[in-house]
Image (cartoon, helix red, strand yellow):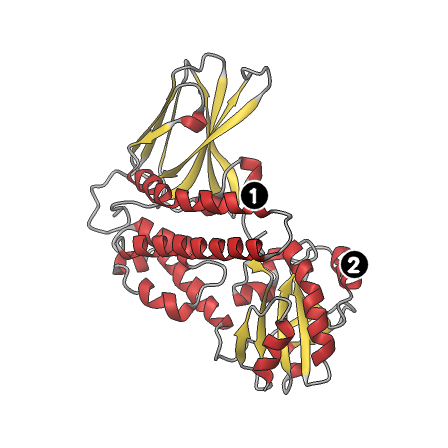
Amino acid sequence: MFYHGRSNTIDKTALNYKYIKMNKSIISILLLLPFMAAAQKSYTISGNISGLKEPAKAYLTTIQGGKWIDKDSVVVKNGKFQFQGTVDMPEPALIALKRDKSPQGKSERDYLSLFLENSRITITAKDSLKNGVVTGSVSDKGDRELEASIKPLTNTIISLNNQFRGKPKDEAWKKASDSVTRLVAEIKNIRIRFVESHLDSFIGLYVFNQDVLDSKFDPAKVEPLFHQFSAALKSSELGKRTLEKIEIGKRRQTGIKATDFTQTDLNGKPFTLSSLRGKYVLVDFWASWCGPCRAENPNLVKAYNQLKGKNFEVVGVSLDQGKPAWENAVKTDGLPWIHVCDLKGWKNEVAVMYGINSVPQNLLINPEGVIIAKNLRGEDVMEKIAAFMK
């Protein structure tokens, strides 16, 4: 209702866990610093589910290649299990428990999230892993403290969304929507303050990468904070990926020349963005499966019809993987502008080049090829676009 857009995130529903919420806070993690040569080089996870009597198996699941993959598995004996191994750096993980027979007589899994690091980690639970308590992981302790500070705000957001879902967009709906917007901003500020107080810890960088560098971050605002991290953290693997993320984000920054691209249109012919030089161009990132994108299309169609004779064009970059769905959406929604797609989904080369990981998003480019605005949406989108064309 209040959130608009689809993000390029892993399917968390299947795992009953939200990776995007794995914002791990910590007092201090120095595992990557060179002077910590004596630090523990491996992890041991010891679990004890005292009320578990029936046979079961525990799985250690981590993210590999952008997907949750079972890294290890062990048989649970008398409610106890243990994992051992090493990680190059702290990382989000899940412990999944599969019982041979649940109290309801069905095979089932339950999950517990934690932050895996090279330390001695203990999990204690009575009858369900999801209600277990994690100790020994400094990272996990910090994460739960951070999430606890945010939980009242997220609970309020969930309550407002549930209360106004499907309701008419009247004054009460607008007030609730404004409240959600303020709460989301407050949550982000809490995370930024956390990062500012953890510039010498790995997890401070992790939260910066995951939450401060969200789908629409402003590089000019966040880059100075990145450079306040310690030299060791900035030179770490995560530090390098974070800087790359910032550099890619600069490609969609206002005031710079739009990076040119060529991609195949609906007729199978190559289209090049710079071929429209001399016109105002709205590059619209969308997909047939994106509900908010489809809901926004009528507004954009109306704007296009009123502005198409005024040196204006729209280029739709689809993040679809199948041409039939893409083509059908264009036809169904009556989208009369230029459409391109390489059928690679979230790996669409134009989207990757601009660092697009949520849709809908758009960029308004002036006749000189400079980005002058972004993410113009709503029923008044025509007026918003026209204001930049004067």
Q: Secondary structure at mark 1?
A: helix
Dividing the picture into quadrants, the one containing residue 304 is: bottom right
Q: CA distance from mark 1 to mark 2?
A: 32 Å
Where in the figure is residue 247, as x and y percent of width and height?
43, 68
Where in the figure is residue 267, as x and y percent of width and height?
79, 69
208 is higher (above) or lower (below) than 222: above
Check if mark 1's residue and mark 2's residue have beta carbons within 8 Å.
Answer: no
Report the disc number at residue 140.
none
Q: Which residue is mark 2?
A: 328
Q: Please name whichever residue, 59 or 313, is drawn nearer the observer in this view of the structure.
A: 313
Q: Please name whichever residue, 131 or 177, is drawn nearer the observer in this view of the structure.
A: 177
Three-letter amino acid code at the position of disc 2: Asn
Three-letter amino acid code at the position of disc 1: Asn
Where in the figure is residue 298, as x and y percent of width and height?
71, 65
341 is higher (above) or lower (below) than 370: above
374 is higher (above) or lower (below) than 238: below
Where in the figure is residue 2, as x and y percent of width and height?
56, 53
Q: Is residue 305 left or right of residue 53?
A: right
Q: Judge depth for marks 1 and 2 and give the one in front.
A: 1
Q: Which residue is mark 1?
A: 162
